[in-house]
Image (tube, grey):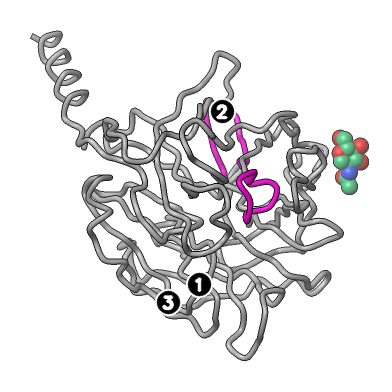
């Protein structure tokens, strides 16, 4: 009887997912998504002072829903929002400029806190992450937990655009300055612009990775690279190892250009790993609100590294996440 039930369950789970096509959302650059209590929650850059969430019970359903405003910031040009559930509340990390500024070098990272465990908020502003020891443009905040210690991740302007990691007591209280994590060193990270940005934590089988975006977001050569934590001190960049090759990049055959600035989410039944990223369908579409969100399943190689494959073609039907 137990065996029968197991078979039935596996069959039911595997065959029940909705079909979906990429892109899953238009005008949605720098996407980040989570599946939580029956719904997908997708946040993306708006380039305004509003932060919105698209909420749907299926991947294919995200295309038709409103981008509901969950928080309006006292600032401008909001980029790269993410929500993380930490100690029972959602924290909305984003970068933006102060309201009275011009241009983009005024970007700094910020966080707001939800009133409860509802990802739709309401959110209350909590902190500006200004690093007084090195106050430069900062962008693309994310959050990683290593050995029970919390860290802010981000990108900053040095002589090149680099990644940083910053120790935190909680999601709104840094306990020190930012530490250098990674710089664009390989040729494939230095196409048109020298860039490492959009760091994203990825945990698997006791190993800890940061997937990041490299080269110029305004070109078809924007892509993903991989760092792995191989030491004991996350604040020491020599304890991280960079994969010599990119892990996800353009597919001219599939007409997907500049895939990058990603997030990760699990299928509703928790059995599958999925990546969400933005890309363009034409080579010269640039780095603005025209970029669309796309999602696809990925697997793990025998060496324990993620295998993202190639970006899937637009308008082709694929099976949705398991358990939908
Ligand atoms: C970083 O790690 C390396 C290798 O373990 C060590 O030699 C170096 O002293 C460390 N640097 C700092 C600032 O702790």
Q: Nearer the viewer, mark 1 or mark 3?
A: 1
Point out which mark residue 50 bears. Answer: 3
Distance between the Cα atoms at labels 1 and 3? 8 Å
- Classify residue 215 as left or right of residue 21: right
Residue 242 vs 265, above or below: the answer is above
Q: Is residue 109 above or below residue 275?
A: below
Does residue 117 lie above or below 35 as drawn? below
Q: Is residue 196 magenta?
A: no
Q: Is 199 on the left or on the right of 12, as rendered?
A: right
Rendered location of residue 272, percent (x, y): 36, 29
Asked if residue 110 shows in the view, the reply is yes
Specify the segment rendered in magenta: 201-222
CA separation in Å, label 2 and label 3? 37 Å
Q: Identify the residue shown where x is 47% and y is 79%.
A: 49
Q: Which residue is mark 2?
A: 206
Question: Is residue 279 visible from the viewing direction of this image?
Answer: no
Crowding near the residue tagged with mark 3, few <14, some 14–19, many ≥20 C-alpha atoms within 10 Å: some
Check disc 1 and report its element: helix, strand or loop: loop
The N terminus sits in image quarter: top left
The quarter of the displayed image where residue 77 is located: bottom right
Against 89, residue 101 (above or below) is: below
- Label for residue 47? 1
């Amino acid at each position: 009887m137990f065996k029968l039930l197991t078979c039935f369950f596996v069959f039911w789970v595997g065959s029940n997912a909705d079909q979906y096509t990429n892109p899953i959302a238009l005008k949605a650059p720098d996407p980040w998504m989570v599946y939580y209590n029956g719904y997908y929650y997708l946040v993306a850059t708006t380039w305004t002072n509003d932060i919105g969430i698209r909420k749907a019970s299926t991947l294919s359903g995200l295309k038709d829903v409103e981008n509901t405003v969950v928080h309006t910031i006292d600032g401008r040009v909001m980029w790269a929002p993410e929500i993380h559930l930490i100690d029972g509340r959602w924290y909305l990390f984003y970068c933006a400029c102060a309201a009275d500024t011009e241009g983009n070098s005024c970007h700094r990272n910020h966080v707001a806190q939800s009133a409860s465990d509802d990802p739709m908020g309401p959110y209350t502003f909590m902190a500006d992450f200004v690093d007084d020891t090195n106050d430069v443009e900062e962008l693309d905040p994310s959050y990683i937990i290593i050995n029970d210690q919390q860290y802010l991740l981000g990108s900053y302007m040095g002589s090149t655009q680099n990644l940083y990691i910053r120790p935190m007591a909680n999601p709104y209280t840094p306990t020190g300055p930012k530490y250098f994590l990674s710089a664009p060193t390989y040729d494939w990270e230095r196409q048109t612009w020298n860039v490492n940005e959009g760091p994203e934590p990825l945990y698997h089988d006791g190993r800890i990775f940061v997937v990041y975006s490299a080269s110029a977001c305004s070109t078809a050569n924007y892509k993903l690279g991989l760092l792995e934590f191989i030491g004991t001190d996350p604040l020491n960049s020599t304890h991280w190892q960079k994969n010599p090759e990119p892990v996800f990049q353009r597919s001219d055959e599939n007409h997907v250009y500049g895939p990058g600035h990603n997030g990760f989410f699990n299928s509703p039944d928790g059995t599958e790993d999925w990546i969400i990223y933005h890309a363009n369908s034409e080579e010269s579409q640039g780095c603005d609100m025209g970029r669309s969100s796309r999602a696809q399943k990925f697997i793990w190689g025998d060496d324990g590294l993620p295998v993202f494959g190639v970006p899937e073609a637009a308008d082709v039907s694929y099976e949705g996440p398991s358990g939908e």
